[in-house]
Image (spheres, rainbow, N blue to C red):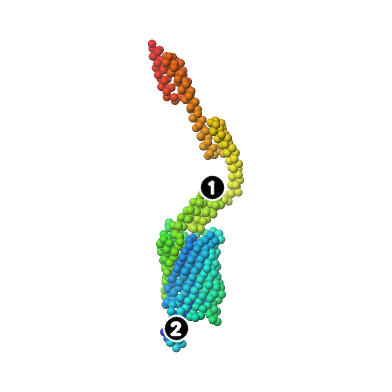
Amino acid sequence: MRKLLLINLCLLLAVSVAQAAAGGTGGNFLLLGGGARGLAMGSAQVALAEDSTAVFWNPAGLARADFPDLNYTHDQWYVDVNHQYFGVAYPTDNGTFGGSYSLLDSGDIQGYSATGSPESVFRTQDSALSFSWARKMNERLSVGVNLKTISESLENTQATSLALDLGVLFDLTSKVRFGAAVQNVGQSLRFITEQTPLPLTLRAGFSVRNRVFTDDRLNLAADYVDDSNVPALNFGAEYVFRDLLAVRAGISKSALRAGVGVKAAYFGLDYAYLSHDDLGAAHQVSLSYSFGSRDTKRAMILDYMALAKAYYNKGRYAEAVVETNKALALDPQDADARALLTKATRALEGGAAGSVEEEVRAEKETEVNAYLEAGRKFMAEAQYLEAITEYNKALRILPSHPETVSLIRQAQAKLEAEVSETVKSEAKAHLGLALKYIATDNYAEALREVDEVLKIDPGNVEALKLYKKLKKLMEIEEQK
């Protein structure tokens, strides 16, 4: 009797490990989940998953993937039953493409006749192959779709079906996100004469993502899930230390979940522990690989921000908004990006008034350029005073115009240099006459010539020295 009971239990688990929760529908392996992270958080992922595991939880999450990534998950369930999940996501300019393959395998099962005699060994396998596409409709809204083919086999009997998943994500704020998905919309599975519907699943929930301290993050999620009219509330929490270690916990259909995750460079390893009242504990391990890291993401943000700031400084506010939004798509909480987006948006909204101002300034620039061109011609002819006059006309139109101010300084320097040369030439002539008068002992006339030099060049060192000498010579003459 115990032997027959064990055989029946193995057959039940092999066909579907989750049927007890789903009310007897077919394809219940479709409810087993994808990725250890999600299961450790109580399967509350409809508004949180944004990598290749989003193919299972909500295809719209694929649109939020920053880099291509792969995920392989192994579930060790009860007896010899195991579940494998492989997911992929590949972002492009035309949306994110992805897919998954899920396989539930019973392992070898010994068959028995009605009399209890051993017969041939057989196994059961259930599988689903999904093709996915998701796209951001704008900076806050994303949509996604899965098309999947489903197959269940029991010994020599097989049933197949096609199904569709649809999902949506919407950012309520930079930290709070809403997600919803309807899954397994399709044909019933048919085994010979028995027909069973797929486990139609509705998911809706919220996630809150918050940065703690400098680099740590706290993610909270809550989902309402109704699979085949079996509603439940799922809750999950995740604390990420420095993007290296994650600690997770959750509740799914009143069952406790927990797990950890570690990341090194582009690789990630996640573990989930799932408790079950009747069948004990189950363990799930996921290995993931991302073709980009947090450092890569930060470098991309800095590149977008550098370009956005350059556009903003040139008054190209629309382009600045576009580049800033690219940075915010990678990190919605980036303070610099949010501040620049506010400034650029305000400047863009004031564009109508700004365009009138620009037209007026353009007209003034044209008039100023005409005066500057005239001034440059006078400069080329060494007519510095005339050049300064033209530049001053330009300065009256646009006060503090940088180029005009610079040209005036150049013209003034040239004029001062020219005057200085003239002064030096006149001073030299007067000093020459003074020396001739000294040679003929005519000190009074020599002194008058020196006075003329000091009138036009008060700091002339030679004239000052000669002035003192002449004074002494005249004093000596008077004493004779």
Above/below status of 133 relative to 24: above
Q: Mark 2 points at which residue?
A: 120
Q: Could you tell whether 113 is left or right of 165 in the image? A: left
Residue type (three-letter) at the residue carrying disc 1: Lys
Percent coordinates x, y for residue 8 in the rendering: 45, 82
Q: Dot 1, how many residues are within 10 Å of its Cα: few (below 14), some (14-19), or many (20+)?
A: few
Q: Split into 4 quadrants, where in the image is the N terminus?
A: bottom left
Q: Split into 4 quadrants, where in the image is the C terminus?
A: top left
Above/below status of 423 relative to 347: above
The residue sitting at the front extreme is: 381
Above/below status of 392 relative to 437: below
Percent coordinates x, y for residue 62 in the rendering: 51, 64
Q: Dot 2, how many residues are within 10 Å of its Cα: few (below 14), some (14-19), or many (20+)?
A: few
Q: Count of labels shown?
A: 2
Query: CA gap, disc 1 to disc 2?
Result: 79 Å
Q: Earlier in the sequence, mark 1 or mark 2?
A: 2
Percent coordinates x, y for residue 55 in the rendering: 50, 67
Closer mark to the observer between disc 1 and disc 2: 2
- Residue 314's tag is 1
Is residue 240 visible from the viewing direction of this image?
Answer: no
Q: Nearer the viewer, residue 387 or 203?
A: 387
